[in-house]
Image (cartoon, rainbow, N blue to C red):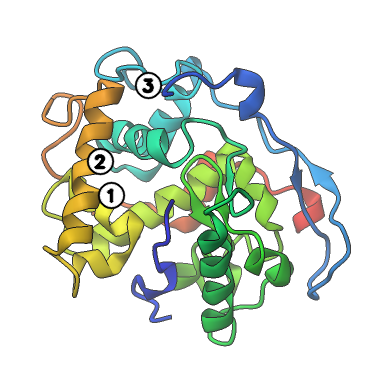
């Protein structure tokens, strides 16, 4: 699962087997600003987008990507203006969650490392970033959602670009179980990788997803090579041809990125009043 150090990105600061029902999860959310240990109310973001909500091709070169999730991945591509990214997101999700939106890492045997990473992320970054309403909970959460996002970095999504106006600062980590919220965070992360790091090919994206250090000081090492190899194998297993230039350009380009607020509006829509 992703242990990418999101705040360093310019801020120094079985495939297809999940049921549609498992892709809808209640997410908790707070009201107000101060940090709290009180249980948040349950909220629901908009449901998964449908084919009519996007203009892109939902049949060619998707392999075994679940049909009900394809419009979400395509909406991520169209909203971000990163052409070809939808199918790359599908390959990422195939490993990180097996397309189960409520996937969480940190409770099962052998997954304590995810909770440790979450705790470190919060401890090492909380003093140089805007406060998180549910920071303590995020520190203990681990990672999860469609894209294996580490909880504190998920909630700080957008801080490098918009600072204290980042939209998830008052949200609880369980919001990542909502597909649209996870999609927003993953889209912003991809844009930061493409903008701030040397990305030679699509497998480099997955290396950066695991950790940006694999694109810098650890580039070329065993971990770098292993992550790349797994990503290429995942694409083959899923049935997504990363060399099909008609659906995925050889290199992704984020030069027409419309900005965090526009991407949030396009993917999440109106912000629930409980989180205002």
Q: Depth-wise, is mark 1 or mark 3 nearer the camera?
A: 1
Q: Residues within 10 Å of mark 1 (few under 14, many from 20)?
A: many
Residue reaching furthest top? 59
Alpha carbon of mark 2 to alpha carbon of mark 3: how far? 27 Å
Q: Are marks 1 and 2 in contact (CB under 8 Å)?
A: yes
Work out whether mark 2 precedes mark 3 in sequence or the reverse, and give the earlier one. 3
Which image quarter holds the C terminus?
bottom right
Front residue of this view, candidates 44 and 218: 218
Residue that badge 2 annotates: 231
Where is 162 relative to 171, above or below? below
Residue 189 visible in the picture: yes
> From the viewer's perspective, is 263 left or right of 77?
right
> Going 38% across and 52% down the picture, which residue do you hit?
258
> Going 30% across and 24% down the picture, which residue do you hit?
238
Where is 125 relative to 240, above or below? below
Q: Residue 55's mark? A: 3
Residue that badge 1 annotates: 206
> Going 70% across and 35% down the picture, which residue do you hit?
25
In percent of width and height, residue 15 lies at 41, 23
- Tell me the SS state at disc 2: helix
> Going 67% across and 29% down the picture, which residue do you hit?
24
In percent of width and height, residue 121 lies at 52, 73
């Amino acid at each position: 699962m992703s242990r990418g150090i999101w705040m360093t990105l310019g801020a120094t600061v079985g495939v297809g087997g999940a049921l549609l029902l498992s892709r809808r999860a209640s997410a908790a959310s707070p009201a107000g600003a101060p940090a709290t240990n009180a249980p948040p109310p349950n909220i629901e973001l908009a449901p998964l987008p449908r084919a009519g909500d996007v203009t892109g091709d939902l049949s060619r070169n998707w392999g075994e990507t679940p049909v009900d999730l394809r419009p979400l991945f395509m909406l991520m591509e169209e909203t971000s203006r990163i052409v070809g990214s939808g199918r790359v997101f599908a390959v990422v999700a195939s490993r990180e969650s097996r397309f189960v939106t409520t996937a969480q890492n940190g409770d099962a045997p052998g997954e304590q490392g995810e909770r440790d990473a979450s705790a470190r992320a919060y401890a090492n970054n909380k003093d140089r970033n805007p406060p998180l309403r549910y920071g303590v909970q995020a520190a203990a959460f681990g990672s999860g959602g469609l894209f294996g996002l580490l909880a504190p970095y998920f909630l700080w999504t957008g801080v490098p670009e918009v600072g204290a106006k980042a939209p998830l600062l008052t949200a609880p980590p369980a919001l990542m179980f909502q597909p649209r919220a996870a999609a927003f965070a993953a889209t912003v992360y991809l844009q930061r990788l493409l903008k701030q790091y040397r990305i030679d090919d699509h497998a480099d994206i997955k290396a950066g997803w695991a950790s940006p250090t694999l694109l810098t000081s650890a580039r070329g090492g065993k971990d770098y090579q292993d992550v790349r190899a797994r990503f290429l194998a995942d694409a083959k297993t899923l049935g997504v041809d990363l060399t099909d230039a008609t659906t995925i350009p050889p290199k992704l380009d984020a030069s027409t990125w419309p900005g965090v607020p526009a991407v949030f509006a396009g993917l999440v829509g109106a912000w629930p009043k409980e989180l205002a």
